[in-house]
Image (cartoon, rainbow, N blue to C red):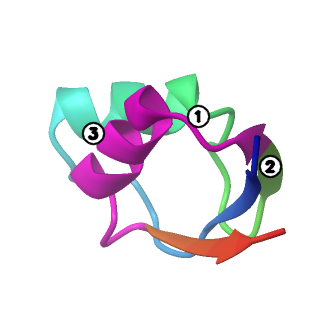
Amino acid sequence: MAKVQITQIRSIIKRPKNQKATIAALGLGKINKTVEKENTPQLQGMIKKVSHLVKVQDV
């Protein structure tokens, strides 16, 4: 399965609780933190929800 690299590029200050929870579930929390995850439909939904806060690259 393909992997994606997710980097948080914007702060979660003044964001709704559901977006903060999604960022935490992705393993992020600080600006410029990067995680590498398997690309699944569930992950794509999470990325779509916070797409304005993260940058996604294929690995």
Residue tagged 2: 35
* Helix, strand or loop under label 1: loop
Q: In the drawing, what numbered circle is on residue 19? A: 3
- Residue at (82% x, 48% y) in the render: 36
**Of 25 and 57, which appears nearest the observer?**
57
Which quarter of the figure is the C terminus placed in? bottom right
Residue 22: quadrant of the picture: top left
Extent of the magenta region: 37-53
- Residue at (53% x, 23% y) in the render: 25
- State the image coordinates of residue 23 (x, y, percent, origin top left): 48, 39
Mark before the other along the chain sequence, 2 or 1: 1
Of circles 1 and 3, which is in front?
1
Residue type (three-letter) at the residue carrying disc 2: Val
Residue type (three-letter) at the residue carrying disc 3: Gln
- State the image coordinates of residue 11 (x, y, percent, origin top left): 45, 64
Is residue 30 found left or right of 13 in the rendered image?
right
* Helix, strand or loop under label 3: helix
- State the image coordinates of residue 27 (x, y, percent, origin top left): 68, 33
Residue tagged 1: 26
Report crowding for label 3: few under 14, some 14 to 19, many 20 or more residues within 10 A (C-alpha). Answer: some
**Of 1 and 54, which appears nearest the observer?**
1
Quick check: is 16 in the magenta stretch? no
